[in-house]
Image (tube, coloured by chain):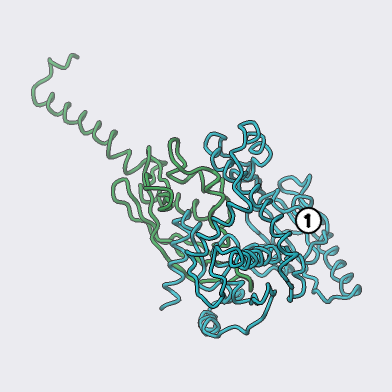
């Protein structure tokens, strides 16, 4: 049945339903339930756990792929990734909290940090810090910081 | 409270990872040994104690002490892992000896005041060193494009994330002073563990029970991902071992080991165009270092150098 044959009230209702559908499809659903029914916060928590687990295992290849600056056009080279963390090892890493604000996220990371020294490894217990993430193309990426010596940070 | 602040700062440095280029421990030499929970207080008091004056080497009249050596290492965090084994320590001490030889020579040639009692700042030394280097071991010209590319091909893994293997380990430590009988009994014990693994025993459980590596013990022997080609011993040990398989009993610098590969990550190499300038820098640096070492060897014939600490004889320029 052509649309112009519907009563005015029904037409308005149909239009409203279509608009609502479009709104949720384009904004709400993408933002809130992007992967297998997970909320953006759950998604961030999962990604952050994967990232920090990779970091604690020295799985640089996995962590590199989750760095925002490793995306096409970014400044982070595999060489830079391999060069970091000299003498540092993370033990007992936990991601305890995730807060999402639009396309930005902050997680709380708790870890024991092992520092190599000439007298053997020293361990700093229970260090906690806030770690930043950004949503790019529907996926969370660890916000990569650029050293001051290499210029201003882009991602 | 203060320690908590330090540890939080360290973790922040891990996160802002490129900053670890510049990361330096405030007093690497006084860093605490492997610790258990609650030992931080002891570490703090250890840090406050001034270390004994131990001389490692003598250059001219100058004595290089352990304290000075540790300060030298803490200038660059990347030197810390190197300083944890004797060969690395000797290489670093050699650098420090060469630095002092050059200071003596710079005084002699007038780049620095001849009288050592006149204090000079680090900036003065740096500026004088540049002039001194330009005369005695100048930076070489930029190599030709073909040579740069060949260098890249040869050192590809160094310009990216190398191929890595996730390794689990059962280590039976052999004390340095162990006699043949003790060594043999430890080897036999390792052999028995291997038999249990081959009989279907769970590697992680056996590692948890037997390994002498305290950090890997809690993780069922898991060492995480290790570069496959960075350590010759490891490379040889894991040759032909595929994911899910283990080695036999291997003799290592620490004792006897059984290793299992649980995962592999392929290398991710930086494309040539993104790393070319870095390679040029590296090639020029290596050539200049060769020239500098040759010059230092010649200089060592005129400046008396003595290695005092045992086991570091290779530090002689």
**Vertical position of residue B1 compared to residue B9: above or below:** below
Tell me the residue that label 1 is attached to: B200
Quarter residue A117 falls in: bottom right
Residue B29: give x, y in percent of width and height.
Answer: 58, 74
B176 sits to left or right of B294: right
Residue B228: give x, y in percent of width and height.
Answer: 69, 49
Q: From the viewer's side, name the closer residue of A21 and A130.
A: A130
Residue at 65% in and 59% down: B223
Chain that is coloured cyan in the picture: B
Q: From the viewer's side, name the closer residue of A54 and B83.
A: B83
A29 sits to left or right of B215: left
> Can you say which quadrant of the picture contains the N terminus of chain B?
bottom left
Query: Which residue is most to the left?
Result: A8
Residue at 14% in and 29% down: A13
> Tag 1's secondary structure?
loop
Query: Which residue is most to the right?
Result: B181
Residue B160: give x, y in percent of width and height.
Answer: 59, 43
Quarter residue B153 falls in: top right
A106 sits to left or right of B311: left
Dot 1 crowding, Cα within 10 Å, few <14, some 14–19, many 20+: few
Q: Chain of mark 1?
A: B
The colour assigned to chain A within the rendered structure:
green
**Vertical position of residue A91 compared to residue A57: above or below:** below
Q: From the viewer's side, name the closer residue of A120 and A94.
A: A120
> Can you say which quadrant of the picture contains the C terminus of chain B?
bottom right
């Amino acid at each position: 049945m052509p649309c112009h044959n519907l009563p005015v009230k029904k037409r308005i209702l149909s239009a409203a339903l279509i608009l609502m559908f479009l709104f949720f499809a384009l904004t709400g659903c993408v933002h809130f339930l992007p992967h297998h029914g997970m909320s953006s916060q759950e998604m961030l928590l999962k990604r952050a756990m994967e990232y920090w687990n990779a970091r604690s295992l020295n799985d640089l290849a996995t962590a590199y792929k989750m760095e925002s600056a490793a995306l096409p056009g970014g400044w982070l080279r595999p060489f830079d990734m391999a060069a970091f963390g000299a003498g540092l090892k993370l033990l007992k890493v936990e991601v305890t909290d995730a807060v999402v604000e639009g396309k930005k996220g902050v997680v709380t990371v708790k870890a024991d940090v092992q520092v190599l020294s000439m007298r053997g490894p020293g361990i700093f217990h229970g260090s906690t810090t806030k770690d930043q993430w950004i949503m790019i193309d529907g996926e969370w990426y660890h916000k990569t910081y650029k050293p001051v010596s290499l210029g201003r940070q882009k991602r | 409270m203060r320690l908590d602040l330090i540890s939080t700062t360290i973790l922040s440095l891990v996160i802002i990872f490129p900053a670890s280029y510049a990361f330096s421990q405030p007093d690497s030499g006084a860093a605490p040994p492997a610790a258990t929970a609650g030992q931080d207080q002891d570490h703090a008091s250890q840090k406050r104690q001034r270390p004994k004056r131990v001389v490692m080497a003598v250059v001219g009249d100058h004595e290089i002490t352990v304290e000075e050596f540790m300060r030298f290492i803490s200038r660059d965090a990347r030197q810390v892992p190197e300083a944890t084994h004797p060969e690395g320590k000797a290489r670093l001490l050699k650098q420090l000896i060469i630095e002092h030889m050059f200071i003596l020579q710079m005084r002699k040639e007038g780049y620095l005041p001849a009288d050592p009692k006149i204090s000079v700042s680090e900036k003065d030394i740096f500026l004088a060193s540049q002039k001194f280097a330009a005369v005695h071991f100048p930076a070489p010209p930029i190599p030709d494009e073909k040579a740069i590319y060949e260098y890249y091909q040869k050192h590809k893994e160094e310009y990216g994330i190398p191929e890595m293997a996730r390794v689990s380990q059962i280590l039976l430590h052999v004390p340095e002073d162990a006699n043949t009988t003790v060594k043999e009994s430890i080897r036999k014990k390792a052999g028995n563990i291997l038999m249990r693994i081959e009989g279907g025993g769970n590697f992680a459980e056996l590692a948890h029970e037997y390994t002498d590596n305290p950090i890997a013990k809690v993780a069922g022997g898991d060492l995480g991902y290790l570069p496959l080609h960075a350590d010759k011993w490891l490379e040889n040990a894991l040759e032909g071992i595929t994911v899910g398989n283990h080695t036999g009993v291997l003799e290592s610098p620490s004792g006897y080991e059984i290793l299992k590969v649980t995962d592999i990550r392929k290398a991710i190499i930086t494309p040539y165009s993104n790393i070319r300038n870095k390679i040029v820098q590296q090639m020029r640096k290596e050539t200049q270092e060769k020239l500098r070492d040759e010059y230092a060897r010649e200089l060592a014939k005129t400046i008396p150098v003595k290695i005092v600490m045992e086991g570091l004889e290779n530090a002689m320029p």
